[in-house]
Amino acid sequence: MLKRIPKTFWWILAILAMMTYAWIFYTSLVEPSGFRWRAVFGDPDYPKGFDIHGIDISHHQGEINWDRLRNAMIDRSPVRFVMIKATEGGDFLDENFEVNFHEAREHGFMRGAYHFWSNKNGAREQAYFFLEKVPLEEGDLPPVLDVENKPDDVSTEDFQRDILTWLHIVEDRYHVKPIIYTYYKFKEEFLSDERFDDYPYWIAHYYVKQVEYKGKWKFWQHTDVGKLPGIKGYVDLDIYNGSYYDLQKLTIPPRQTEEELENTNIHQSPDSTERDSLNPMLEAD
């Protein structure tokens, strides 16, 4: 019976099967990673609708030619901000931090510094180490906590408490909400608690046309294979979700004088007074 079916039918069936396989392969493997391949081979796609671009760097970028980087463009827009790795855990200072931190401001970039969270050290130890090594100033972006891993032997509740401890200690020093960097699935799984809602988020989500995280966010790290003059190899590219004016408002404000602090204390609201009463608890070991 099968021998009676024309060969043309079998050819058509084979072609349809090949087309179906090719479509499945493209939609499931090629298309989702298209952003990466286009970036690697020199034809990058950038997120649409965003004008404020930046980068984040560490010792992995080696020695940077800041004079060349100052004139770099991302999607026909200048590089506005640079996030710089500073510390990790309780005793690691990035070997290029001091140079990068100085050069970023000298060359007109808005700069920020981030701490990479380690599960090997306590929250207080990491917070005070960051504060000891990172001299953020007026006009700098808020301190950043890069958190990407939760230890298996620690409950989510205890992990969240540790993260909040770091955030509170650093916030009390600089009087701004630190930025939380993480990838969107980690945020949804471990940091989806209303206590984190007031913190600015920097979401890592690569090779997609838009961030899948549905909550509020300020920064988006959209690729790890950016190429810019002045940097050898690849560099992470980021965008800010807002205007340059909004980005400036996010920065560390001028330090208050003693007289201004006294006036602030006199006019403190009950809520802020209650919060200040918790500070000794944060300092207690």
Image: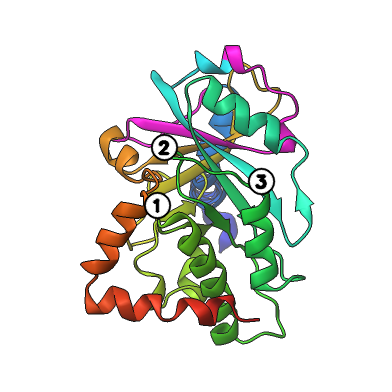
Q: Which mark is residue 86?
A: 3
Is there any visible trace of residue 148 in the rendered image? Answer: yes
State how far apart marks 2 and 1 are (Cα): 28 Å
Q: Nearer the viewer, residue 179 or 284?
A: 284
Image spot of residue 147 (x, y percent):
59, 62
273 relative to 255, above or below: below
Q: Quadrant of the C terminus?
A: bottom right
The reply, left or right, for residue 172 in relation to residue 69 is left
Q: Which residues are magenta?
A: 43-68
131 relative to 158, above or below: above
Image spot of residue 206 (x, y percent):
52, 47
Q: Nearer the viewer, residue 10 or 135?
A: 135
Q: Which mark is residue 211?
A: 1
Which residue is found at the position 31% from the left and 77% from the top?
Answer: 273
Kindly identify which residue carries mark 2. Answer: 139
CB atoms of marks 2 and 3 within 8 Å: no
Q: Amino acid at mark 3?
A: Ala
